[in-house]
Image (cartoon, rainbow, N blue to C red):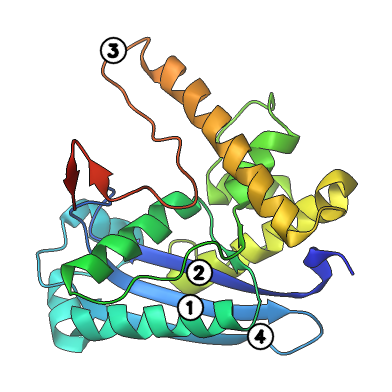
Amino acid sequence: MSWHLGRMCGFDLETTGVDVEVDRIVTATVVQCGGGQPTVAANWLADPGIEIPEGAAKVHGITTEKARAEGKPAIEVVADVLAALGQVIASGVPIVAMNARYDLTLLDREAARYGLPPLPVGFPVIDPLVLDKNVDQYRPGKRTLTALCAHYEVNLGAAHTSEADALAACRVAWRIATRFPKVADLSLAQLHTGQIGWAAVQATSLQQHLRKKDPAAYCPPEWPLISRQQNGETR
């Protein structure tokens, strides 16, 4: 059976910003769907322990005041998310995350921040962004989740809520597999390995493009997790 006909687990974070090294989790979703079974979602709201910038709050709708009043302590949320994903990984279900290197790296840094064990290595990840860029490299336009949902005819629902985005990522991955048999026919192991190479090529291409305006632009080639080792220091 092709991987896209089985169970998948969408994972998404809404955060205080876009820097995986310093920004924090605000909301998180781990949602299992597909495979002929009911959709089951777990959602968290965290008090990140820092101010949520106005720009970030406008995107996901969570202000600092709301997070402090209603959110669980960040360390508890990070521990819960790690445990939930760990159970999914142990069951053999792949993790689906749009731009996985962002969400998985930020979660990894949060784990380190609170002295929690990281996720195990080598589990299968499906990244709709990497898949789309590989199968339709020269299509013009944006590659945001909203754009991919429009292109692949997926109902996004409440965009920029972690649950809606996590579910949409799974549905986009499913649509890509249904349209491109060369993706559907790969085993999960082959798909994961393929994405490592595709993501590296895509990062190099994007970096070349960005350096036309910013000679110092850097796009990490690692996928689905950016190593903590930077400039000789382990973060």
Q: CA distance from mark 3 to mark 4?
A: 46 Å
* Element type where label 4 sits in the image: loop
Q: CA distance from mark 1 to mark 2?
A: 8 Å
Which of the two discs, 3 and 2, labels the residue nearer the N terminus?
A: 2
Residue 96, horizontal then vertical, whole percent: 59, 63
Residue 159, horizontal then vertical, whole percent: 49, 62
* Crowdedness near tag 1: few (<14), some (14–19) or many (≥20) residues, C-alpha within 10 Å: many
- Considering the image in quadrants, where does the N terminus appear? bottom right
Residue 64, quarter of picture:
bottom left
* Element type where label 2 sits in the image: strand
Nearer the camera: disc 2 or disc 4: 2
Up the image or down, 127 lies above or below 44; here it is above
Asked if the residue at tag 2 contacts the one at tag 1, i.e. Cβ–Cβ closer than 8 Å, the answer is yes
The residue labelled by disc 2 is 11
Which of the two discs, 1 and 2, labels the residue nearer the N terminus?
A: 2
Nearer the camera: disc 1 or disc 2: 1
* Amino acid type, label 2: Phe
The residue labelled by disc 3 is 215
Residue 230 horizontal side relative to residue 196, left or right: left
Q: Residue at x 65, y 53 (%)?
A: 192
